[in-house]
Image (tube, helix red, strand yellow):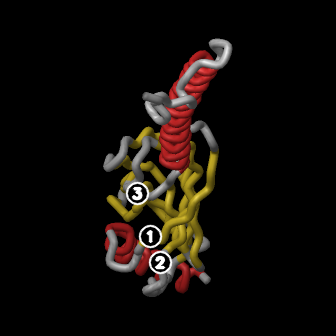
Amino acid sequence: MIDLGGHDHRSMPSGGSAPDSVMTRRKMNVRLIAASVVGMVLGGVAVGQLRDSREEREQNSSISLVAFVASGGSGGGDARGVYQMAGQLAVINAGPAPITVRAATGELPGVRVRGVGQSRLLRPDGTGWIEVEVRIDCPIRFGSEPLSVGFAVETADERARKVSRPVAVLGSAWHRDVERPCAHLADLVKRNG
């Protein structure tokens, strides 16, 4: 009896090299797959850290302020009809990172504002009061146009920036505090002028 198909000649070693070559290829494939997985994991971590770093930089340089007249104060006028008083601006940090407000200045026809107080560190959602000197030319008719106040601000990433915010003066404490003295001062200027 002759056995013609009983052995698989492909799996028989030819000089002992076929099984070693298959094992070597398998080990090589496993190493390549492992290297690819490690590369993807490290790449994913690096991309995540880069994104987090970028978001943190954007957050630290972001400025979102809200400002309004907080209070007026006593003051006095001069012979030219200029009334000067102390006042305060309330400044709210509506941004995601702390900021330091270093200065405030603003001007409208007949109204000038200049910060005279110290710098204020404002935490996110924090409010600070900025001391200002308010100079008003009497008589003045306050319009509905807001006062544009420029703020010198230092962001959490230690960058100095300038931002402007509108501040309503009509109906504010400054408006109420200056009405009577300014009317009196205007009458004096008319009499003497």
Q: CA–CA distance between discs 3 and 2?
A: 14 Å
* Label 2 Cα crowd, 10 Å radius (few <14 / some 14-19 / many 20+): some
Q: CA–CA distance between discs 1 and 3?
A: 9 Å
Return the mark for residue 122. Answer: none
Residue linked to disc 3: 89
Identified at 51% across, 78% down, the residue is 138
Q: Secondary structure at mark 3?
A: strand
Q: Secondary structure at mark 1?
A: strand
Identified at 48% across, 53% down, the residue is 132
Identified at 53% across, 84% down, the residue is 191
Return the mark for residue 146. Answer: 2
Q: Is residue 115 left or right of residue 74?
A: right
* Label 3 Cα crowd, 10 Å radius (few <14 / some 14-19 / many 20+): many
Where residue 168 sits in the image (x, y, percent)?
41, 74
Where residue 120 sits in the image (x, y, percent)?
45, 40
Q: Quadrant of the C terminus?
A: bottom right
Give the mark nearest the N terminus, 1 or 2.
2
Residue linked to disc 1: 167
Q: Secondary structure at mark 2?
A: loop
Tell me, yes or no, whether the two marked residues, 3 and 2, touch with CB atoms within 8 Å.
no
- The kind of residue tagged 1 is Val
Compare residues 134 and 10 and report the one nearer the observer.
Answer: 10
Tell me, yes or no, whether the two marked residues, 1 and 2, touch with CB atoms within 8 Å.
yes
